[in-house]
Amino acid sequence: MKEYKNYYTIQGPVDEVYIALTNPFTIGLWTGEEDAVMSTEAGSEFSIMGDSIVGKNIEFIENKKIVQQWYFGEDEETPSIVTLKLHNHKEGTSVELHHTNIPDEAYADIVDGWNTIYFKGLRDFF
């Protein structure tokens, strides 16, 4: 199992970036997928990007923090946890990403996905 940590700058205010990450309609706008399932209720299941990212929502602190468990299959012994922390930044919002317990065989694809799909889509949206 591996972990990945990075910082991304989004040229939008923290409250709008938070909405872009948590509102299913807005997620659909920046991902190009119309069937996003998302709720800010802890314990709720989510699905975005055509079911390529699925999991369970663990914690939300409005405009500050999102914690999710990402599913990688039935055999998970240790949950894969994604934590996104939002901070004000002179250029908009700094998003601190920390993704733990990434299966070794999925690591390269996950890191590439964060950089070239997830955060690229979010940046392009703003």
Image (cartoon, rainbow, N blue to C red):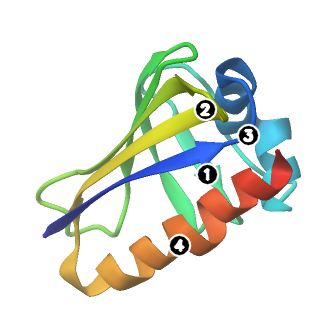
Q: Nearer the viewer, residue 123 or 100?
A: 123
Q: Earlier in the sequence, mark 2 or mark 1?
A: 1
Q: Nearer the viewer, residue 47 or 60?
A: 60
Tell me which residue sits at (20%, 63%) in the image.
Answer: 76
- Give the secondary structure at mark 4: helix
Disc ID at residue 113: 4
Task: Name the disc covering residue 47, or none.
Answer: 1
**What residue sits 61% from the left and 51% below the top?**
47
Q: Residues within 10 Å of mark 4 (few under 14, many from 20)?
A: few
Q: Residue at x 41, y 72 (%)?
A: 111
Give the crowd class for mark 1: few <14, some 14-19, many >=20 residues within 10 Å: some
- Marks 3/2 in contact by CB < 8 Å: the verdict is no
Give the residue type at disc 4.
Gly
Badge number at residue 11: 3
Which tag is nearer the camera, tag 2 or tag 4? Answer: 2
Element type at mark 3: loop
Residues at discs 3 and 1 in contact (Cβ within 8 Å): no
* Mark 1: secondary structure: strand
Q: Do the residues bearing badges 4 and 3 touch, measured as CB atoms within 8 Å?
A: no
Place residue 90 in its image quadrant: top right
Mark 3 vs 1, N-terminal side: 3
The residue shown at (65%, 23%) is: 14
Viewer can see residue 51: no
Task: First in sequence, mark 4 or 3: give its number.
Answer: 3
Earlier along the polypeptide chain: callout 4 or callout 1?
Answer: 1
Q: Tag 2: residue type? A: Thr
Q: Is residue 99 above or below residue 108?
A: above
Separation (CA) of disc 2 from disc 4: 20 Å
Figure quadrant of the N terminus:
bottom left
Q: Nearer the viewer, mark 3 or mark 1?
A: 3
**Residue at the spot of label 2:** 93
